[in-house]
Amino acid sequence: MDYFARTRVRDIISGQKVDQEVIILGWARTKRLSKNVGFVEINDGSSLHNAHVVFSPPADFPELERIITGTSLRVVGKVVEVKGREQAYEVQASQLEIVGDCSPDYPLQKKRHTFEFLRDIAHLRPRTNTFGVINRFRSKLSHCIHQYYQDRGFYYIHTPIITTSDCEGAGDLFQVTTLPLQEIAARAQELDLDEDFFAEKAYLTVSGQLEGELMCTALGDIYTFGPTFRAEQSYTSRHLSEFWMMEPEMAFCDLDEMLILIEDFLKHLISFSLEECPEEMGFFNKWIDKGRQKVLQSIVEADFARVTYTEAVEILKKAGREFEFPVGWGNDLQSEHERFLAEEYFQKPVFVTDYPREIKAFYMRVNDDEKTVRAVDVLVPLVGEIVGGSQREERYDYLKENMIQQGLDIEQYSWFLDIRKYGTVPHSGFGLGFERMIMYLSGMSNIRDVIPFPRFPRSARF
Ligand code: 4AD
Ligand code: MG
């Protein structure tokens, strides 16, 4: 239907189409009808703004009567400039056609719905202002991430969604199987993995890192950007069971070199948002978190803070406050500790490096003290941990020892050990949680509201 001839509303709003005849395809937001003139606001999803369409005289457009909020329309008209009104352009309609009537029980009324309410109404949620903005922003930021790495010579690697290894060693895995589990349970029968699809245990990936490490030892600098899955029983506002992660992996690169890349990359995403997404950032600043733009601007201008885990523990001990979880060398930092460091102590993003070996994954490079590893987390105000990464253990013996200590099956991971056997190189990588970055940039407070179809325990709707 006029696919290549139509005009997107954003191009009308920006003034590109003035004095031209356009075809608009979209959905009615509001209608006002009087004897002499009719107005319909049409939104086509290309912008927060609507096309303001004038029907004069309304008697020439009998279908106006049928239009309610949500009706889909095809309008032909001429774009004219109007002075002294909020909207600089309007469309004087010459044709109107209803594409699809809207049932009168359509719930998008003038009143504002809560984000929780909207999560249950699939057809409505993406048509609201907030989710329109969020989804357009996600699209732009994804493109920006690809552009950043492509411009720097990284190759985009498609790592598998189904895998047989547990990268984080945390055991929060969704198992993938075609076995008739109900039948097996009913017959009180043992699972015979040989009859399963892959003839071994397989899972949805928690990270593309292990395969990414393999690929970087052939292609140099690579990145992955895809969905990852974790079966954690986490009901927090910062955890999803399915989330998107971007993971670069750099050969011949140590942790200090990588920290420079991380800071440049995160600042690039902030600058891009401020400069290239004025509609989205203006919306967030006005409706979600007042003053967001100013905060972000100040982040770009200053250096990130840097501390080791050991220094962070000292800061927390001297904080002079009761934390729910105890602070002590060897304990993992909890969300409350991370937020204290980023929000109150440093009041900006902070790199925390060199965590105790026991609380981090098997692949991280062991420091000379044999007690800590070359890990890095980036903590930011509002969200907490946004990036996790490390320099990788490139020494065969150390890695093997680590794997044994953490109870991994060496046979299963022999391919990963082999990277250290055939021309090993120092290498480093990290993972950026895409939804957490969107939260940080937008000020949205619940991660479920920055992804189109949130998955969390007991919920995988639509
Ligand atoms: O710190 P994580 O677990 O690190 C890894 O998975 C490494 N393999 C990455 C690498 O070195 N290539 O996860 C990385 C980031 C976290 O910092 C956080 O931003 C995000 O992924 N993340 C989650 N986001 C939403 N929901 C969850 N359940 C998340 N778990 C981690
Ligand atoms: Mg982490």
Image (tube, rainbow, N blue to C red):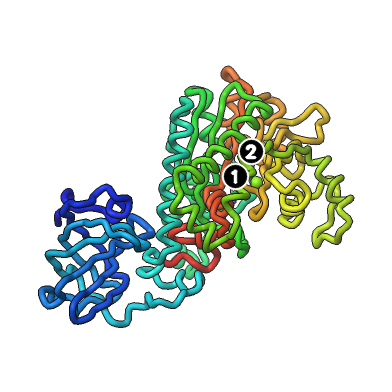
- Label 2: element kind: helix
> To which quarter of the image does residue 423 belong?
top right
Q: Residue furthest front?
A: 84
Q: Is residue 195 visible?
A: no
In the drawing, does residue 257 fall left or right of residue 72?
right
- The spot of residue 227 in percent (x, y) is 47, 48
Q: Residues at badges 2 and 1 in contact (C-beta under 8 Å)? A: yes
Q: Secondary structure at mark 1?
A: helix
Q: Is residue 187 or residue 286 the one in the foreground? A: 286
Q: Residue at x 45, y 47 (%)?
A: 277
Location of mark 2 (residue): 301
Q: Residue at x 60, y 47 (%)?
A: 296
Residue 449: give its label: none
**How many residues crowd mark 1 within 10 Å: few (<14), some (14–19), many (20+)?**
some
Q: Nearer the viewer, residue 145 or 71?
A: 71
Compare residues 54 and 396 and report the one nearer the observer. 54
Position of residue 396 measured from the top left corner of the image (x, y, whole percent) = 66, 25
From the top left corner, tell me how far across and down residue 66 is, in percent. Answer: 19, 79
Q: Measured along the vertical axis of the image, is residue 178 above or below residue 419?
A: below
Residue located at (46% from left, 74% from top): 112
Q: Is mark 2 within 8 Å of ligand 1?
A: no
Q: Which residue is mark 1?
A: 297
